[in-house]
Image (tube, rainbow, N blue to C red):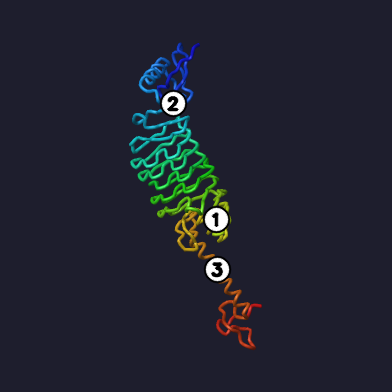
Amino acid sequence: MPLVPAICTQCGARLEVESTSDAAICKFCQTPFITEKAINHYNTFNNTTNNIRGDVVNVYGVSSADFVIRAGMLEKYSGMMTDVIIPTTVSEIGIEAFSGCSSLKSISIPDSVTRIGNRAFYGCRSLTDIVIPNSVMHIGYRAFEATGLKNVLIPNSIKTIDYSAFKNCSNLENIAILGETIIKSNWAGSQYMFCGCNSLVNINIHSGTKVLFKKTDSWGDRLDKEIVIPEDIESLTNEELDVLAVALGVGSFARNIVKTSINNVDIQKLYNERYEQRRQQEQQERWQRQGLCSHCGGKFGIFSEKCKNCGRRVAW
């Protein structure tokens, strides 16, 4: 049977169909269509425009040409709706696809999407609600930076979260990472995941998640660190806690400004308690080396093993 060009009446994909068939199924969106209508759709479209390449698909949703999709990638949304439903034909949200959509408040992502690209929702200040489906495996660089998100659930399908993914989300309060993933962080340019998230109260991170922290010292030497989140966050050493806090962008123990709990543990309090314990232990060891009372630093009598200050006996 001869094949003739047609355009899917549902998603706008270019097709070739048998002209004698009554109906067919679109190989892109899996929607059945009437062959005669698809052929007429192609003829009408071809007569009105000839400057759009065959690999471009315009999906008509809430308004004409709101979405531009190429080979499954949503390249740009140009509509003005506050609540948007992404078509099920999309497998990837492209670079800056929704960037700067200031009126966008909520978005529905279908489970056909596997990747959210770099800066995909950058600057969507009104975006407060999003559900990331369990099909998404990668969240790109600065994907949700400077959005209005308040609570975020990262599904266990996510394998990597790139640099600064949620940077400067000033309204973000809670985030949960449900599965083992890799969180990338870079000292250069303060490319931390939650840098600038001043309202962030708690981060729940699944055990086994890796936080990769890139850092270069003043000599140009790489000082990369990798922190694997344990089941008990308190089992991390002080150095590991410090690296984790800096890498996530929630503060620095060196400046005493860590403000966010991790897995409901107040890590600032934990760090301070450990620091005080270590300081006391080092002080006691120093007093003991000097022949002083290890409890209070007092002196012992010449013929007595008791401290003149606290009355405790010398610990040999």
Instruction: Let me know if residue 20 appears in the view.
Output: yes
Q: Earlier in the sequence, mark 2 or mark 1?
A: 2
Q: Position of residue 124 (x, y in %)?
A: 38, 43
What amino acid does circle 3 point to? Gln
Is residue 230 shown to the viewer in this render? no
Q: Which residue is mark 3?
A: 277
CB under 8 Å between discs 2 and 1: no
Labels 3, 2: front one: 2
Contact, CB < 8 Å: mark 1 with mark 3?
Answer: no
The image position of residue 24, as x and y in percent, is 46, 18
The disc labelled 2 sits on which kind of residue? Answer: Arg
Q: Is residue 206 above or below residue 4?
A: below
Marks 1 and 3 sit apart, C-alpha to C-alpha, by 31 Å
Image height of 178 relative to 190, above or below: above
- Secondary structure under tag 1 reads loop
* Residue 226 placement, left or right of 50: right
Q: Which is more N-terminal, label 2 or label 3?
A: 2
Alpha-carbon span between mark 3 and mark 2: 68 Å
- Which residue position holds label 1? 216
What secondary structure is found at the residue carrying circle 3? Answer: helix
Q: How many marks?
A: 3
The residue under the point 52% across, 55% down is 244
Question: How many angstroms separate mark 2 from mark 1 (CA)?
Answer: 45 Å
- In the picture as drawn, the residue positioned furthest to the right comes out as 316
Give the secondary structure at mark 2.
loop
Residue at x-position 44% and y-position 48%: 166
Identify the residue position indicated by label 2 in the image. 53
Q: Amino acid at mark 1?
A: Thr
Looking at the rendering, which quadrant does residue 78 occupy? top left
Q: Are marks 3 and 2 in contact (CB under 8 Å)?
A: no
